[in-house]
Image (tube, rainbow, N blue to C red):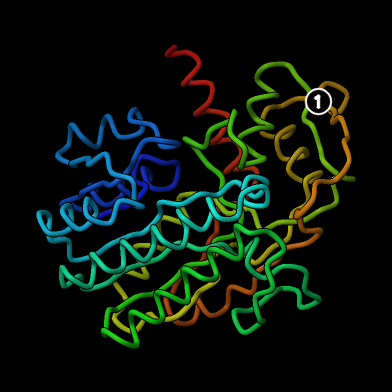
Amino acid sequence: MRALVTGGAGFIGSNLVDALLDRGEEVTVIDDLSTGRRENLDKALSRGASLHEVDIRDASRVLEVFASERPEAVFHMAAQIDVRKSIEDPAWDAGINVVGTINVLEAARASDVRRLVNTSTGGAIYGETDVMPTPETVQPLPMAAYGQSKQCAEQYCGWYSRLYGLSTTTLRYGNVYGPRQDPSGEAGVIAIFAGRLLDGARPIVYGDGRATRDYTFVGDIVAANLAAAAHPQAHGAYNVGTGRESSVLDVIDALREAAGVSEHDYQADFEPARLGELDRSSLDVSRAHAELGFTADTPLVDGVRAVLEHQRAERAAQ
């Protein structure tokens, strides 16, 4: 299979690229390297993957890559994911997450792509809801522009399916974490907290630490993408997560356990909650299990331990 991964130099995308290569697939990456890291692809490029430094907002360049590479399956992961920046500049956010997605869809249509798997958010798309865990049937009411733009991108996937017959499906992720997530970035509390632990610094918690998310290990996210691409009947949106709520305080406890440090040695500093952040997020993942045969089963402590080991190895190599 010829696969193309947009955002393939990023945290999730590069892990998927590695998995595709492990399966013997031909892999093309589109990434402008604005947030993705070339070093995430060093091994993949040595194994035969190709990288095109292209911004998905550049429709003609995206079309050129698709026309030359002729992918059979596309994994669309390129996105703007910073919630706070999306609120400050929603037009910029939409330019990447909506217009960029349209450009990818149009290139996929023109190139006769067999299946497109779109990346969306389970954490930000539903907004404040009393339905916990939240199934895909709940109406999305995003609180941040990021969630709004992702919902709009999903709808364009559906439109391309209805009008052109392009086979698309969307995966709404929980809060993804794992190796290669940037500990100095704006997203990814586990990576940030792990980095601070290794620095001997205290984690900064916004709010009281009781806000919950469905923290999902990147290896499980990769497995869900492969399942969605392979399943001939996959359609619409699927929640992808563990189906379990974990609070920020639970994350800190898991870090303590994985690192073997005491509560006294690793304590949090608390700051006021931030605008646009949800108090709770819990995904109903039964549809993905029933229709795709997918289950995210990596325990939080094991996943956190993998993050710490990866960050330690990166520091040792510097």
Image: 73 above or below 189: below
Q: Nearer the viewer, residue 151 or 250?
A: 151
Q: Nearer the viewer, residue 117 or 247?
A: 117
- 249 to the left or right of 125: right
Task: Determine the residue positioned at 60% across, 66% down.
Answer: 148
Instruction: Name the residue furthest left.
Output: 68
Residue 215 is situated, as x and y percent measured from the top left of the image, at 63, 53
Residue 180 is situated, as x and y percent measured from the top left of the image, at 47, 35
Residue 14 is situated, as x and y percent measured from the top left of the image, at 36, 42
Q: Nearer the viewer, residue 89 or 114?
A: 89
Report the residue marked by disc 1. 266
Task: Determine the residue positioned at 23% across, 64% down.
Answer: 107
- 272 to the left or right of 113: right
- Local crowd size for mark 1, using a 10 Å CA cut-off: few (<14), some (14–19), many (≥20): some
Instruction: Name the residue furthest bottom.
Output: 162
Image: 233 above or below 318: below
The kind of residue tagged 1 is Tyr
Q: Quadrant of residue 43?
A: top left
- 182 to the left or right of 205: left
Residue 187 is situated, as x and y percent measured from the top left of the image, at 61, 42
Q: How many marks?
A: 1
In the rendered image, the quadrant that contains the N terminus is: bottom left
Image: 135 above or below 247: below
Q: Nearer the viewer, residue 60 or 25?
A: 60
Provide the secondary structure element on which disc 1 rests.
loop
In the rendered image, the quadrant that contains the C terminus is: top left
Task: Determine the residue positioned at 44% across, 71% down.
Answer: 170
